[in-house]
Image (spheres, grey):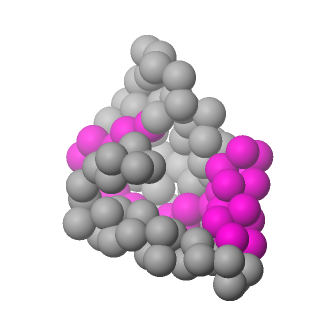
Amino acid sequence: MRPSAREAVVGKIFENEQVKIDGRNFVKCIFKDVELAFAGEDAFGFDECEMLGARLILIGAAHRTAVCLSMLYQSNKGFASNIEEMFSAIRRGTRSPETGA
């Protein structure tokens, strides 16, 4: 992801819609029954937001990355343990030196 100045979105209520989150920093927003769409193009942030029925979906490059990881994981070519390590780093909230995650 390329570094950028994030667009600030403050105090907005999103309801029953798809919200693209790349490159945006949401502050004190409310998300009701929304899809948070992440394309993998830029970082994002949520500060003091309420999530009421929000769900993350992957689109574009982020979706293609998820499909690739799934294919590699299922391939029986030795990638499963590497991918498991990536998800362990995600669960711990740490950065993995191999993945930058």
What residue range appears in magenta?
44-72
Q: Is residue 60 visible?
A: yes
85 vs 30, nearest the viewer: 85
Rendered position, 76 above or below 83: below
Is 48 one of the magenta-colored residues? yes
Q: Is residue 78 left or right of residue 10?
A: right
80 vs 55, nearest the viewer: 80
Q: Residue at x 53, y 31 (%)?
A: 1
Residue 92: x and y, percent?
Answer: 23, 66
Q: Is residue 3 left or right of residue 48?
A: right
Residue 10: x and y, percent?
Answer: 38, 31
Q: Residue at x 66, y 50 (%)?
A: 62
Residue 3: x and y, percent?
Answer: 46, 20
Residue 29: x and y, percent?
Answer: 38, 44
Rendered position, 19 above or below 89: above
Task: Specify the farthest residue to the front.
Answer: 77
